[in-house]
């Protein structure tokens, strides 16, 4: 349980439901440095566990290669990842991450937070 | 990013362009759509750039690996595990075999070996391909120009991209040759020591026989019926002495007097004598290159080498043919200059070559020719000592001797003598040279009244020497070894006119004895007796120029003459 705020980047929240949420701030451009900060906080909250994780990238502007590689390599603390997108830009970034960068854990893309949470909690498609 | 990833990215962009904005996104307006395409293209460009850099590094690594593969001193190749054909090989292997790499790739592995090893190679590699780990024997790879390359093999199995054997060969040809040479040298040394020892004892016995027979003959009245018989005994002893002389030459235990010899001039001098050895039917040519060819060698031994080689050539030609003797200077710069088997140290050499168009010899015969008593000639014709004597003489002079021969074609023997820097002395007249050990006696015995100390450890020989000297009027003292000689001279006081001493004796050598006697002023003159001297070998072969020396066995006349010469010198 806990919340960390990375100003201008994201809020990282571990909820009572066991889902770790990374909620990107609107207008953020994610780069390697920021991704590293998120990864460090994620690992701290996960405390050695592998957590179902939700990432909301609806408002981001871009995600560079370094940030995508870091995210894709977080299999030690991410059990499954639900990527929430909204609009063409985040959809392209999400799909690019899923199909080109290829994370080393199960990943799905959702258009709503609700659908994403349902999948993370109950494993439904 | 893999090729698959690239496909996926392109596919994704097409789908975006076709209006399917997000996988589950709602329809979007034109502007966000363009933003999305730009973002997608940026990511794609970034990943492509990264991929290009990664590929460049990988290619450089691959090139490095490839260069290392080619530059490796080992002979490397990979073989298809099913067909046992070469898939690839390195430049080292191609160069070693003298075959372009393109011609090696695709060939069956076993075909790379010399005929005799093909079956063994095929079996060994087939076993390795089945995953058996039995050791592969040493094998010979066939070289394009003929000859083989002895290799030790190690094989490893590699499953990808297709099942392969990775083969590493190490060239052990040179190692094997060195081993063989060492073995040969050791054998020759052992035989040399053995025959040298036998010859030494034998020489003493022959000396006694020769001297006794001569003395006995002298005591008989002229025309006595036993005189011819005694002459036969003397002749036989002399022939025996010639033989032991050869053995001593082989075992390098002869006292030699090396001098700077102009080899070309020397060979011209003995030319007439060599020609006398050869029948009319054989053509004989002498070719001496221009310029100085000076070697440091005992001239009579050089003659002996030439005689032995020419006689062998004559025996091999038997009928019509040609014998050529050549003298030339050669400079050996490095390993590349000479046939690899020679292993000559770099430097200048006088090369003396005797070639013939005779029957030649097989590899088996060639391997043994330098061994004493090895002969293929009928009993009574060959002694098997000719080449072993040459070997001993040439080695003692610091040189090398090599035989090249082909059955039915002929033989060439090359003698390399280290070129000598100093000025040469005049070559001795050919007629004066005789077979080692058998000096020609002139019947001019001299008498005297001086006091002579005779030091000799062989009792019979000592008694005989003393009796010859006493017979000639000398006062003779005897001693069985150096220490005894020293003690008796010191006890007696004063000096003697001449000390005759054996060179090799137990406890104190003749050389040591003489040093002490000279220091104490007890000997006005010295005469060394020897069949050979081990110490002479240790000290570079000679006793020095200033000493008188008589080689065993000797006739009474030779002894008396040497005694007179030594006393005259001492004055
Ligand atoms: N020029 C040559 N041509 C052919 N064979 C040779 C030649 N020289 C030497 N050999 C072979 O080497 C053997 C040994 O030679 P050598 O030591 O001189 O002894 P020998 O002449 O008494 O047999 C000979 O018996 C002969 O078989
Ligand atoms: Mg001979």
Image (tube, helix red, strand yellow):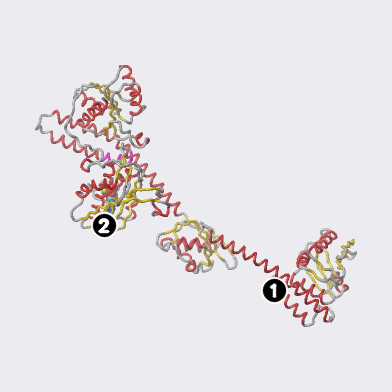
Does dot 2 land on a helix, a strand or a loop? loop
Q: Residue at x 86, y 66 (%)?
A: A21
Magenta stretch in the rendered image? B243-252
Q: Residue at x 78, y 69 (%)?
A: A106
The numbered mark, 1 or 2, whose residue comes first in the sequence reads 1
Task: Give the farthest residue toward the bottom.
Answer: B18
For label 1, the residue is B4
Tell me the quadrant of the picture where the C terminus of chain B can be found. top left
Q: Chain of mark 1?
A: B
Q: Say whether residue B265 is left or right of residue A76.
A: left
Q: Can residue A62 be seen in this snapshot?
A: yes
| Total residue callouts | 2
Vertical comparison of B451 with B269: above or below: above
Q: Say whether residue B488 is left or right of residue B447.
A: right
Residue B21 in the image: state x and y as whole percent.
80, 79
Callout in the foreground (1, 2)? 2
Residue B32 in the image: state x and y as whole percent.
83, 78
Let me know if residue B251 is in the magenta part: yes
């Amino acid at each position: 349980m806990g919340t960390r705020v990375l100003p201008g980047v994201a809020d990282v929240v571990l909820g009572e439901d066991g889902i770790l949420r990374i909620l990107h701030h609107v207008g953020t451009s994610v780069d390697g440095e920021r991704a590293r900060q998120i990864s460090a906080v994620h690992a701290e909250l996960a405390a050695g566990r592998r957590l179902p994780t939700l990432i909301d990238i609806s408002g981001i502007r871009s995600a560079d290669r370094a940030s995508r590689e870091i995210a894709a390599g977080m299999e030690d603390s991410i059990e499954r990842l639900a990527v929430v997108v909204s609009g063409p830009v985040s959809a392209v970034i999400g799909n690019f991450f899923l199909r080109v960068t290829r994370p080393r854990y199960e990943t799905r893309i959702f258009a709503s937070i609700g659908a994403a949470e349902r999948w993370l909690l109950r494993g439904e498609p | 990013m893999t090729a698959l990833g690239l496909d996926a990215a392109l596919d994704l962009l097409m789908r975006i362009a076709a209006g399917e904005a997000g996988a589950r996104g709602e329809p979007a307006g034109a502007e966000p759509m363009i933003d999305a395409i730009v973002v997608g293209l940026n990511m794609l460009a970034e990943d492509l750039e990264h991929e290009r850099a990664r590929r460049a590094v990988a290619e450089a690594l691959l090139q490095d690996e490839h260069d290392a593969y080619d530059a490796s001193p080992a002979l490397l190749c990979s073989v298809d595990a099913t067909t046992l054909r070469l898939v690839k090989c390195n430049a080292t292997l191609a160069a070693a075999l003298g075959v372009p790499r393109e011609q090696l790739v695709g060939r069956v592995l076993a075909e790379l070996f010399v005929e005799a090893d093909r079956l063994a190679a095929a079996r060994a590699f087939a076993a390795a391909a089945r995953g058996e780990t039995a050791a592969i024997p040493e094998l010979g790879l066939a070289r394009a120009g003929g000859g083989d390359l002895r290799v030790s093999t190690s094989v490893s199995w590699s499953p990808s991209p297709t099942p392969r054997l990775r083969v590493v060969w190490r060239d052990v040809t040179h190692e094997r040759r060195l081993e063989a040479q060492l073995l040969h040298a050791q054998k020759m040394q052992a035989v040399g020591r053995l025959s040298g020892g036998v010859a030494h004892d034998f020489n003493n016995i022959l000396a006694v026989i020769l001297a006794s027979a001569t003395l006995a003959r002298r005591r008989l009245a002229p025309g006595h019926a036993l005189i011819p018989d005694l002459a036969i005994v003397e002749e036989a002893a002399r022939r025996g002495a010639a033989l032991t002389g050869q053995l001593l030459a082989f075992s390098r235990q002869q006292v030699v007097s090396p001098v700077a010899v102009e080899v070309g001039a020397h060979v011209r001098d003995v030319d007439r004598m060599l020609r006398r050895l050869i029948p009319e039917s054989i053509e004989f040519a002498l070719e001496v290159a221009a310029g100085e060819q000076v070697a440091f060698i005992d001239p009579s031994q050089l003659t002996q080498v030439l005689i032995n080689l020419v006689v062998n050539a004559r025996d091999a030609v038997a009928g019509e043919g040609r014998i050529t003797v050549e003298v030339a200077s050669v400079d050996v710069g490095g390993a590349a200059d000479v046939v690899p088997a020679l292993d000559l140290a770099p430097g200048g050499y006088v090369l003396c070559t005797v070639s013939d168009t005779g029957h030649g010899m097989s590899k088996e015969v060639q391997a043994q020719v330098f061994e004493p008593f090895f002969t293929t000639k009928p009993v009574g014709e060959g002694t098997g000592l000719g080449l072993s004597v040459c070997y001993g003489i040439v080695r003692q002079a610091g040189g090398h001797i090599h035989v090249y021969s082909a059955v039915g074609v002929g033989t060439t023997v090359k003698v390399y003598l280290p070129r000598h820097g100093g000025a040469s002395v005049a070559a001795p007249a050919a007629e004066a040279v005789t077979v080692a050990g058998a000096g020609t006696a002139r019947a001019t015995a001299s008498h005297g009244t001086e006091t002579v100390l005779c030091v000799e450890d062989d009792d019979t020989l000592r008694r005989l020497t003393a009796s010859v000297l006493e017979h000639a009027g000398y006062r003779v003292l005897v001693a069985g070894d150096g220490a005894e000689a020293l003690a008796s001279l010191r006890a007696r006081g004063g000096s003697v006119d001449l000390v005759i001493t054996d060179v090799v004796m137990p406890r104190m050598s003749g050389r040591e004895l003489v040093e002490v006697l000279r220091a104490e002023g007890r000997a006005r003159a010295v005469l060394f007796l020897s069949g050979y001297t081990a110490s002479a070998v240790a000290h570079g072969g000679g006793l020095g120029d200033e000493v008188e020396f008589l080689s065993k066995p000797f006739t009474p006349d030779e002894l008396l003459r040497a005694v007179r010469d030594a006393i005259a010198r001492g004055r």
